[in-house]
Image (cartoon, rainbow, N blue to C red):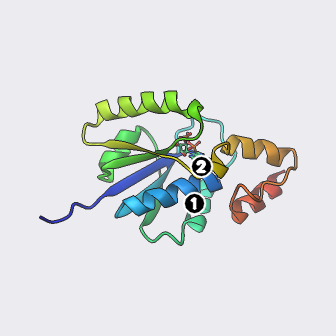
Amino acid sequence: MAKKTIIGLYPGSFDPVTNGHLDIAQRAHKICDQLHIAVVANPSKKVLFSVEERVDFLKKTTRHLPKVVISSFNGLLVDYARHIKAGMIFRGLRAVADFEYEFQMALINRSLYHGIEIVFLVPNEKFIFLSSSAIKEVAMLKGDVSGFVPAVVEKALRKIY
Ligand code: ADP
């Protein structure tokens, strides 16, 4: 029997991408034949970087992952998953704080799209407390974020603050 191609979708705000996101992307990349990393473009969250900038950071930092496709989308996550024929949605789980919201969203998304599996990946423990919002706060206060984000993001943050 022919092996089914596994298309994965890793969605997020990525405002901006951190080493924690990249850790999850690398793990998801091992599982899929094609991995779409997609910036959620809905204006529901106040963001620092434009969709184009966030896409650009992701493109520059995932060049070493040959099966990755970077994009952005508006609207419902499951509609986008259907559109790209994804069979799996990847989400990263940090501390327990992520769990309740992610669990609820996973169940809602699966009820909207029965063919989808939501896969939770756990990052290296170095990144358990890392979030884009914490990085923006540290950068705003002129702290050193070089251990937490790729160089291109660090440079962009330094320019802003
Ligand atoms: P969203 O607004 O969709 O939560 P984020 O960019 O904050 O977008 O996160 C995208 C995904 O990456 C989420 O599943 C989030 O839990 C995960 N993630 C973010 N930071 C980390 C990290 N440090 N370690 C593991 N997963 C992470």
User: Measured from the top left, where is residue 87 in percent x and y?
Assistant: 30, 49
State the residue in front, 13 or 8: 8
**Is the C-beta separation of discs 1 and 2 under 8 Å?**
yes
Relative horizontal placement of residue 71, taking residue 126 as reference (left or right): left
> Is 73 placed above or below 95 here?
below
User: Measured from the top left, where is residue 118 in percent x and y?
Assistant: 37, 42
User: Measured from the top left, where is residue 156 in percent x and y?
Assistant: 75, 59
> Is 67 placed above or below 135 here?
below
Q: Quadrant of residue 30?
A: bottom left
Q: Is residue 17 visible?
A: no
Residue furthest out toward the right: 142
In the picture, the quarter occupied by the N terminus is bottom left
Q: Is residue 46 visible?
A: yes
From the image, tell me which residue sits under label 1.
58
Indicate which disc, 1 or 2, sits on the residue closer to the N terminus.
2
Q: Amino acid at mark 2?
A: Phe
Q: Quadrant of residue 149?
A: bottom right
Relative horizontal placement of residue 94, taking residue 118 as reference (left or right): right
Residue 14: which disc?
A: 2
Q: Residue at x 44, y 63 (%)?
A: 69
Relative horizontal placement of residue 48, taking residue 104 as reference (left or right): right
Residue 103: which disc?
A: none
Q: Amino acid at mark 1?
A: Leu
Q: Residue at x 26, y 61 (%)?
A: 5
The local secondary structure at tag 1 comes to: helix
**Quarter holding ligand 1:** top right
> Is 67 placed above or below 125 here?
below
User: Measured from the top left, where is residue 100 in percent x and y?
Assistant: 50, 27
Q: Residue at x 73, y 41 (%)?
A: 134
Beta carbon at label 2 within 8 Å of ligand 1:
yes
Relative horizontal placement of residue 102, taking residue 116 as reference (left or right): right
